Image (spheres, rainbow, N blue to C red):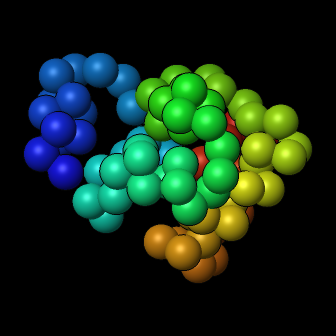
Amino acid sequence: MLFSFFRFESGKKRSKLGRLLDRHGYTQEELREESGVSRNTVSKACNDPKYVPSPNVLKKLMSAIRKLDPGAKADDYFDI
């Protein structure tokens, strides 16, 4: 959490998904473990506001996201 806080405060732009993790104190590593997608993919999804995942990756990420935000829809976090 502390690392995530400092990274957010450093001015680095975060995606909607990255901001969700920050608000809930959830790490990118925890998202990676829960979703089963690669570390690089989670990093892109959390740090690149323009990132659009493939359908397979989207399904995995949304399954993990819904554990934090049960009513979440893909377009809440990705511009699809």
Q: Is residue 73 above or below residue 9?
A: below
Who is closer to the viewer here, 35 or 61? 35
Who is closer to the viewer here, 47 or 28? 28
Who is closer to the viewer here, 61 or 9? 61
Quarter of the picture holding the C terminus: top right
For the point 39% across and 32% down, the residue is: 14
For the point 43% across and 56% down, the residue is: 30
Left or right? Give the position of 18 relative to 65: left
Name the residue furthest right: 55
Left or right? Give the position of 72 relative to 55: left
Q: Is residue 9 above or below residue 20?
A: above
- Residue 67 in sight: yes
Residue 17 x %, y %: 50, 46
Who is closer to the viewer here, 18 or 1? 1
Q: Is residue 39 above or below residue 76?
A: above
Residue 40 x %, y %: 56, 26
Hey, which quadrant is residue 47 in on the image?
Answer: top left
For the point 73% across and 56% down, the residue is: 60
Hey, which quadrant is residue 5 in on the image?
Answer: top left
Left or right? Give the position of 16 relative to 21: right
Residue 44 x %, y %: 55, 27
- Number of numbered discs visible in the structure rendering: 0
- Residue 23 in sight: no
For the point 79% across and 56% down, the residue is: 59
Residue 70 x %, y %: 58, 79
Name the residue furthest bottom: 70
